[in-house]
């Protein structure tokens, strides 16, 4: 009993901090989503009205929300596999015994993760420039004309996905590299003695052993791409033709541009519900791959 009280005393500061700075604001935002909290309510709470589910109903009837949801799902469906593939490929290369200067390459590939998005945006604006960008110059070598990456509604979203994958894959690369280094060498030696090729070793040894880590990485990556905001905010401001508006960007506009804080809270909890459902599905599928 005394040990239990001592344990609670030690964790009490952390529990109080979580309750004050996380649980409390989340519950307040949930309550706010059932009101018409706006700039007038900020001036006086007497202007606040409870509207029930009206914010959610109006949100589902707004065409921009469905476009933002489609843009966000594009980020998830395209960006998650690309990011995991890039992370796994880089981890495999860094784990190869013949590769030299591994520390340098590990640092270089991880550097975009800790680089501020504004600096990354400046670099990528030059890379994607219609006339002077290196990407269009490279396409020109193959006879492909210049593409207006950030001004064309068809290409703007893929361009942001490409930039996001480049910026973020290094974080998961480090996680996968740690998983690869934890695989016992005896498994590869036994597979080699049995005559397994490099591809067969990767398929039957590396992937099954790495499956739990891949499942965790996929969940983290999915959660990150569902919450994409900074990339379209810095690079395109939601354009062109609202083609790069994401759900989180819509929430920001509703809350901090139009001051419809009740509607913005509703957007946040719709996004939370979607992420929760997708995460549950991933967790149900993940054990089957182990």
Image (cartoon, rainbow, N blue to C red):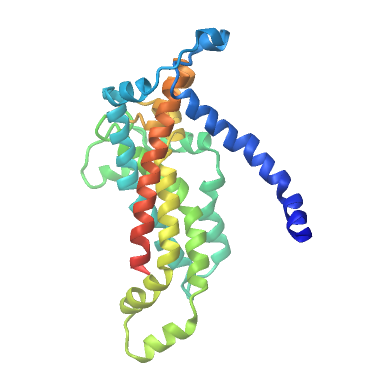
Which residue is painted at 32% across and 74% down in the image? 203
Quadrant housing the N terminus = bottom right
Out of 61 and 113, give the one closest to the viewer: 61
The reply to whether residue 280 is in sight is yes
Residue lying at the far bottom in this picture: please name it.
193
In this picture, residue 36 sits left or right of residue 5: left
Which residue is painted at 43% across and 87% down in the image? 189
Up-down relation of residue 153 to residue 6 (above or below): above
Which residue is painted at 50% across and 65% down in the image? 177
Out of 128 and 67, give the one closest to the viewer: 67
Residue lying at the far front in this picture: please name it.
1
Give the x, y percent position of residue 220: 45, 51
Give the x, y percent position of residue 234: 45, 29
Residue lying at the far left in this picture: please name it.
143
Quadrant housing the C terminus = bottom left
Which residue is painted at 54% across and 66% down in the image? 102
Give the x, y percent position of residue 243: 29, 29
Up-down relation of residue 224 to residue 50 (above or below): below
Up-down relation of residue 276 to residue 32 (above or below): below
Up-down relation of residue 123 to residue 98 (above or below): above
Q: How many dots with numbers?
A: 0
In this picture, residue 178 sits left or right of residue 76: right
Residue 116 occupies quadrant: top right
The reply to whether residue 136 is in sight is no
In this picture, residue 41 sits left or right of residue 129: right
């Amino acid at each position: 009993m005394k040990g239990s009280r001592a344990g609670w005393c030690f964790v009490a500061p952390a529990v109080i901090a979580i309750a004050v700075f996380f649980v409390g604001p989340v519950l307040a935002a949930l309550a706010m989503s059932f009101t018409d909290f706006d700039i007038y309510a900020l001036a006086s709470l007497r202007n606040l009205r409870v509207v029930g589910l009206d914010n959610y109903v109006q949100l589902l009837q707004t065409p921009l929300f469905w476009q933002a949801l489609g843009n966000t799902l594009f980020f998830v469906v395209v960006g998650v596999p690309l990011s995991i593939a890039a992370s796994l490929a880089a981890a495999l290369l860094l784990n190869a015994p013949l590769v030299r200067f591994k520390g340098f390459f590990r640092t270089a590939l991880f550097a975009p993760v800790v680089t501020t998005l504004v600096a990354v945006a400046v670099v990528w604006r030059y890379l994607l420039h219609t006339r002077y960008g290196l990407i269009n110059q490279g396409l020109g070598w193959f006879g492909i004309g210049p593409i207006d990456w950030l001004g064309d509604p068809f290409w703007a979203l893929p361009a942001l996905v490409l930039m996001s994958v480049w910026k973020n894959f290094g974080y998961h690369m480090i996680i996968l590299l740690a998983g690869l280094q934890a695989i016992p060498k005896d498994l590869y030696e036994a597979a080699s003695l049995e005559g397994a090729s490099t591809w067969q070793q990767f398929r039957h040894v590396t992937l099954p052993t790495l499956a739990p880590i891949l499942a965790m990485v996929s969940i983290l990556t999915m959660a990150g791409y569902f919450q994409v905001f900074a990339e379209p905010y810095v690079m395109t401001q939601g354009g062109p033709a609202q083609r790069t508006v994401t759900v989180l960007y819509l929430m920001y506009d509703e809350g901090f541009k139009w001051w419809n804080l009740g509607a913005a809270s509703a957007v946040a909890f719709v996004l939370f519900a979607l992420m929760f459902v997708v995460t549950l599905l991933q967790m149900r599928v993940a054990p089957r791959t182990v």
